[in-house]
Image (cartoon, rainbow, N blue to C red):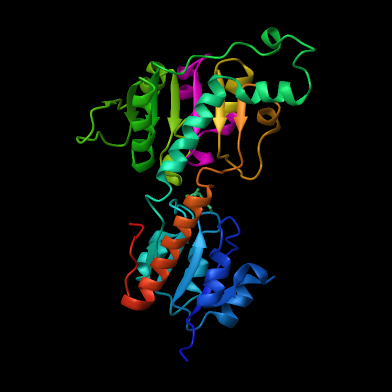
Amino acid sequence: MTTKHRIIQVGSLAGSPSANKNLADRYDVVELWKYPDRKAALAEHGKGIAAVVTSANYGADAELINALPDLKAICSWGVGYETIDIQAAKQRGVQVSNTPDVLTDCVADLAWGLLIAGARRMGQGERFVRAGLWGKGQVHGSIPLGLRVSGKKLGIVGLGRIGDAIARRGAGFDMDIRYHNRRKRDDVQYGYEASLTDLAKWADFLIVATVGGPGTRHLVNQEVLEALGPTGIIVNIARGPVIDEAALVAALQAGKLGCAALDVFEHEPKVPEALVTSDNAVVLPHIGSATLETRLSMENLMLDNLQAYFDTGRVITPAE
Ligand code: 8YV
């Protein structure tokens, strides 16, 4: 009988169909989130641990990394890894893997769902029907007219894997598409705007699909939001802190921005009351990748990375 490798799992992966079970079946798992004193748990169980499983939610900070003297691999469930201290991992020679590509389509689909929901006031319409008002009150008058989606100008903030998939879907809506990135891409035909404010001025709709972390914090600020303007719609399926949320609320309240359709927030799971109660906001609880198929693919890729490390010494999809 072979003994199971011992790993640390930072948090529960209950958002995945069978990740917790598969990890528990295949490995000897130290379930870190169940210990009231994390430092003490790391001191007690840390020796001999070569691999950690985490997610973008839970991350892996320098304290965790440095508390594990034998650590060689961090396998994350999710594509974003701004909560993993990549520098600390590099210094220690620890490999980090994430789950790119497998969630791209579903996150891009949700971006379009949010955009259409915002433009066509779908949330407001649904609330109207659910409140039993249809037939009692006038639909028109109670719900302002929406905005046409097809044929509009779409700005994409961050033309990476997910931004690309969003742009491809835009062709089906006959949209004119431009993007803002740190650098212009030579492999795409879409127009490039070096200034995000200029992109926002040009666009009817702006979809945020960039990476998170300190480099993009508050990239979308008051100036950008006001450039998008009173009929503009901003969609965010990336990371909450990319948008200055206080500026977003202020712009919506002042009528300087038309609508915000958001899957992510600056201080999740907190959503500002002003957004919860606004008919000009669509709010979702970070469900971009939350389909059965995608969550299963993310789970499998995380498990494959982990097993590949134990079998070959190398993860399959390194984060950098
Ligand atoms: C996950 C995500 O739900 O992959 C990501 O970066 O944001 C989502 O797919 C999240 O990572 C869970 O922590």
159, above or below 76, in the image: above
Residue 27 position in % (x across, y down): 51, 77
**In the picture, residue 158 is in which quadrant?**
top left
84 or 289, nearer to the observer = 289
The answer to which image quadrant residue 318 occupies is bottom left
Q: Residue at x 64, y 45 (%)?
A: 269
Of residues 278 and 102, the one drawn nearer to the viewer in this rendering: 102
Q: Is residue 199 left or right of residue 298?
A: left
Asked if residue 60 shows in the view, the reply is: no
**Outermost residue toward the front in this view:** 135
Where on the picture, by quarter, is residue 253? top right
Q: Is residue 35 above or below residue 58?
A: below
Q: Is residue 14 left or right of residue 101?
A: right
Q: Residue furthest bottom?
A: 1
Q: Which residues are magenta?
A: 221-246
Q: Is residue 179 at all visible to an observer of this figure?
A: yes
Q: Is residue 314 above or below residue 212?
A: below
Magenta residue check for 245: yes
Closest to the observer, 285 or 232 = 285
Q: Residue at x 50, y 53 (%)?
A: 295
- x 49%, y 67%: residue: 53
Q: Where is residue 195 shown, x and y percent of the image? A: 34, 26
Q: Position of residue 92 (x, y in %)?
A: 38, 71
Q: Name the side, left or right, on which 163 lies relative to 63.
A: left
Between 49 and 221, the one nearer to me in the picture: 49
- Quadrant of the image for the C terminus? bottom left
